[in-house]
Image: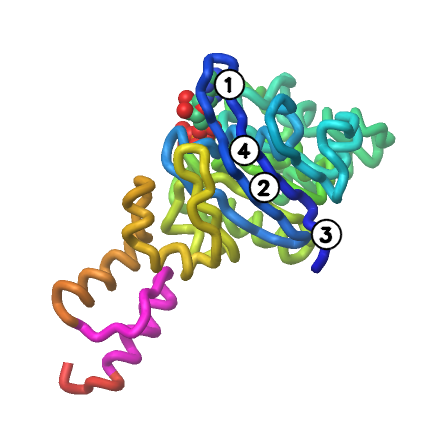
Amino acid sequence: MPIPRLSARIDSFCYPDGTVALSDIRLDILQGEFCGILGSNGSGKTTLLRLLDGIIKEFSGSVLLDGADIRRLSPREIYGKVGLVFQNPDDQLFAHSVYEDVAFGPRNMGFAEQEVTRRVGEALESVDMADLDKKDIHNLSYGQKKRVCIAGLLAMGHEILLLDEPTAGLDPMGEYRMMELLTRLNQESGVTIVMATHSVDLVPVFLSRLHILSRGRLVRSGTPEEVFNARDDLSSVKLRLPYIAELIHSLKSKDSLPFKRLPLTVGEARREILELFKQHSSL
Ligand SMILES: Nc1ncnc2c1ncn2[C@@H]1O[C@H](COP(=O)(O)OP(=O)(O)OP(=O)(O)O)[C@@H](O)[C@H]1O
Ligand SMILES: [Mg+2]
C-alpha cells in the first residue's frame, strides 16, 4: 500500500464562534488521484481544503503530507508541494496585471527571471489567457479571474493541487474546458488533484473518486458509480443525481423500462439505450 500524499484524521475542528465545521474525517489522497469533495453549501468543503493545505492548524487530529505532520512543516515545505486555489478569485489575486500575478509565485520560489517568464507563458497558455497577460486584474471577468488563479498555481509547478469549486461561475463551455485542463494536468503531468464541487453533472465524466461531505462529516466515499447509486443518501445530504441519471432512473421506475444499470454520463446513457433497443426490438 503506497503512503498517501495527504492523510487526514480529523477528530474535530471548531471555528472560534463555536461552529463545529468538521468531525470524524478519515481521508487519504493517493499519488495521481483526481478526486472530488461533494457537498451542499456549508457542508465544510472549504474548511477541509484549508486544513489539507495547512492554513488551519488548530484542530484535534492530524493531517500528514507525505507522512509528515503538516503543522510541523514550514510554509515553504508545504507550498513546495501543495497549492490551494481559493473559491473566490478576489481573495487570491492581488497584483495589478495578469502577468505580474502569475509571476509572483515562481519569483518567490527563487527562479531566475527568464525561467519565471517561461513558466508564466506556459501557465497562461494552458488556461487560454496568454493574450491577456498585460490586462489589469480588476478588469477581468469572473471566469477569467478563476483561470488566472489556476495559472498562478500551475506556474509554481505544485505536485498536489487543491481546488475550491474551480468550475463555479464559469459558463458551460468554460466548465468543460476547466475540467479538461485539470484532467490533462492529472494524466499528463501526474498532478494529484482534489477539488471541492457541486457540479454533479460533470464529476462522473472526469473524476475517479468522490467523497461526500455533509454537515462536516464524510458520509460516503467511492467511485462515482458507487456514490450515485445510493440515490437516497444523496437527497438526504441535499445533492441530486446527474440529470442524465435522473432521466434514466425515472424511465426505469415510472415507465418500467428495463435498464440494467444507472448511467451517469451522456455516453454511458447512449450505450445503455442502444443496448436496450437491441435486446427488446419490440420497444
Ligand atoms: N470563519 C468562520 N467562522 C465561523 N464559522 C465559519 C467560518 N467559515 C465557515 N464557517 C462555517 O463552517 C461551516 C462550513 O463552511 P464551509 O465554508 O467550509 O462550507 P462549504 O462546504 O465550503 O460551503 P459552500 O458550498 O457554501 O462554499 C458552515 O457552517 C459555515 O457557516
Ligand atoms: Mg466553500
Residue at point 37% right, 51% down?
A: 201
Residue 48 is tagged as: 4
53 within the magenta span: no
Write down the region rendered in magenta: 257-277
Disc 1 or disc 4, which is closer to the eye? 1
Residue 3 is tagged as: 3
Secondary structure of the residue carrying numbered label 3: loop
Disc 4 beta carbon < 8 A from ligand 1? yes
Disc 1 beta carbon < 8 A from ligand 1? yes
Residue at point 52% right, 34% down?
A: 164
Identify the image quadrant of the N terminus: bottom right
Closer to the chain start, of discs 2 and 3, is 3
Residue at point 72% right, 32% down?
A: 70
Closer to the chain start, of discs 4 and 2, is 4
Q: Is residue 35 above or below residue 25?
A: below
Residue 15 is tagged as: 1
Q: What amino acid is found at the position of numbered circle 1 in the picture?
A: Tyr
Identify the image quadrant of the C terminus: bottom left
Residue 156, horizontal then vertical, whole percent: 73, 36
Residue 265, horizontal then vertical, whole percent: 37, 61
Q: How many residues crowd around disc 1 within 10 Å: few (fewer than 14), some, or many (20 or more)?
A: few
Residue contact between numbered discs 3 and 1, judged by CB atoms under 8 Å:
no
Residue where numbered disc 2 is placed: 127
Secondary structure of the residue carrying numbered label 4: helix
Q: Is residue 85 above or below residue 253?
A: above
Q: Mark 4 and mark 3: span between their CA atoms?
A: 20 Å
Secondary structure of the residue carrying numbered label 2: loop
Residue contact between numbered discs 2 and 1, judged by CB atoms under 8 Å:
no
Q: What amino acid is found at the position of numbered circle 2 in the picture?
A: Val
Q: Mark 2 and mark 1: span between their CA atoms?
A: 35 Å
Seen from the viewer's position, the closer of residues 174 and 30 is 30
Q: Mark 4 and mark 2: span between their CA atoms?
A: 26 Å
